[in-house]
Image (spheres, grey):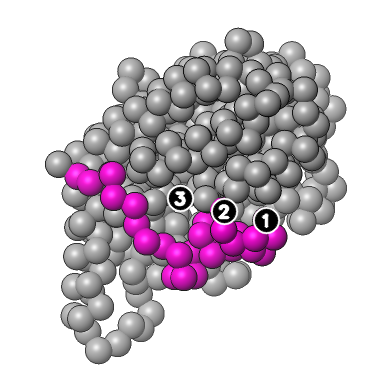
Amino acid sequence: MYDFDTLLQRKNTDCTKWDALARDYGRDDLMPFWVADSDFPVLPEIVQAIRSRATMDQTFGYTIAGDRYYNSLINWNRNRHGLEIAKETVLPVPGVVTALSLCLLALTREQDKVLINPPVYTPFFDTVRSLDRHLVLSPLVERNGRYEMDFEDMERKMAEGVKLFILCSPQNPTGRIWSREELEEASRLCRKYEVALVSDEIHADIVYPGHRHIPILHVDPHAVLMTAPSKTFNIAGLKSSYMVIPDEAYREKISAWAHKMHLYINVFACEATVAAYENGAAWVDELNRYLEQNARFTVDFLAEKLPAVRAYVPESTYLMWLDFSGLGLCGEEINRKMVEEARVALNPGEEYGEGYDQFMRLNIATPRAYLTTGLERIASAFSSHS
């Protein structure tokens, strides 16, 4: 029904993924598989809603998030995730990283300890450090391509005075969907050591068939949930995100910081969110099936053409965590060959934590024909080392 096989022409549109290659990789002739957005046409109703709003009035003045906005996200979360959300617990914000900053400012003080689980989304490191909090690392443990939290290590570190734990759920870059038992144990530890639990669930809707995302609020009503339609519907440029904060004390503190900094979402963010959540269910289902096929294609391709590189089908996200350690190359050499020989842009593993320099993150949210060309370039560049 929907077209995921047509490659959007995004170059020279000030698109970060396509137009920041020279800035970040030193050349602009690379195939981009890095920035976590997709190369698919967005849901048609989103385009229609923005066009309609752009021609409706002769002004774009200050705008509130109205009842339709709140109802759309409440209904989406009820239908998609079985999560009941009360309107008064929702705080719209212009980005999940912005939401994380608000949590750090409101729930911790300078030099407080903040726990994360590498390999993990790069801004977790940057945001904590930029706000002068002390970063505590509890790396995930990999068992046969499946990453798990090390609860014994997490408890030892929480016992030493951690004040806030940032959970990535679903997990970026490993693609894990945490089980209810894992979420309950993380929540139990946070309660035991009086650690605030903040969950980044921006990838919650990108779930492969046979799997189910469990929102943290299903197991911990005192947690803070941060999410957005942006990854799902490829509208990150519109800066539409929101927090769900059932705990009244937390909500007052976080809202106060948001008001101090005048953080609101814009008129087109509201329109796009409503259009996505009211009309996008079938589109997302089809997208997830397409992404799973891309993931399986990638695993099969590498197994045949470059078997020394380990890959697995994630449970969620359109990101794949590739292990190049079997090639016997150091991280610097892997990165160089990617750029100079394969001429593709992937995210280097060291961005996600120390010790992951022989890994790469691959974004597969692109038409399969384009993905195939990129994988063929990678196989050719590394074939002599496989």
Q: Position of residue 331 (x, y in %)?
A: 77, 35
Is most of the magenta stretch helix, strand or loop? Answer: loop
Q: Which badge, 2 or 1, comes first in the chain's sequence?
A: 1
Q: Is residue 18 magenta?
A: yes
Q: Would you say 350 lies left or right of 196 here?
A: right
Q: Are marks 3 and 1 in contact (CB under 8 Å)?
A: no
Residue type at tag 2: Leu
Residue type at tag 3: Asp
Q: Position of residue 144 (x, y in %)?
A: 60, 10
Task: Give the distance between the C-alpha atoms of the residues marked 2 and 1, in whole angstroms.
Answer: 9 Å
The structure residue drawn at horizontal position 66% and vertical position 64%, both measured from the top left corner, is: 23
The structure residue drawn at horizontal position 73% and vertical position 44%, both measured from the top left corner, is: 336
Q: Considering only vertical position in the picture, is 59 above or below 212?
A: below
Q: Which residue is mark 3?
A: 37
Which numbered mark, 3 or 1, is in the foreground of this view? 1
Q: Which badge, 3 or 1, comes first in the chain's sequence?
A: 1
Within-10-Å neighbours for mark 3: few <14, some 14–19, many 20+: many
Q: Which residue is mark 1?
A: 25
Task: Please tell me whether mark 2 sits on a helix, a strand or a loop.
Answer: loop
The structure residue drawn at horizontal position 77% and vertical position 22%, both measured from the top left corner, is: 328
Q: Mark yes or no: residue 87 visible.
A: no
Task: Please tell me whether mark 3 sits on a helix, a strand or a loop.
Answer: loop
- Quadrant of the image for the N terminus? top left
Q: Which badge, 2 or 3, comes first in the chain's sequence?
A: 2
Magenta region, residue range: 2-30
Q: Are marks 2 and 1 in contact (CB under 8 Å)?
A: yes
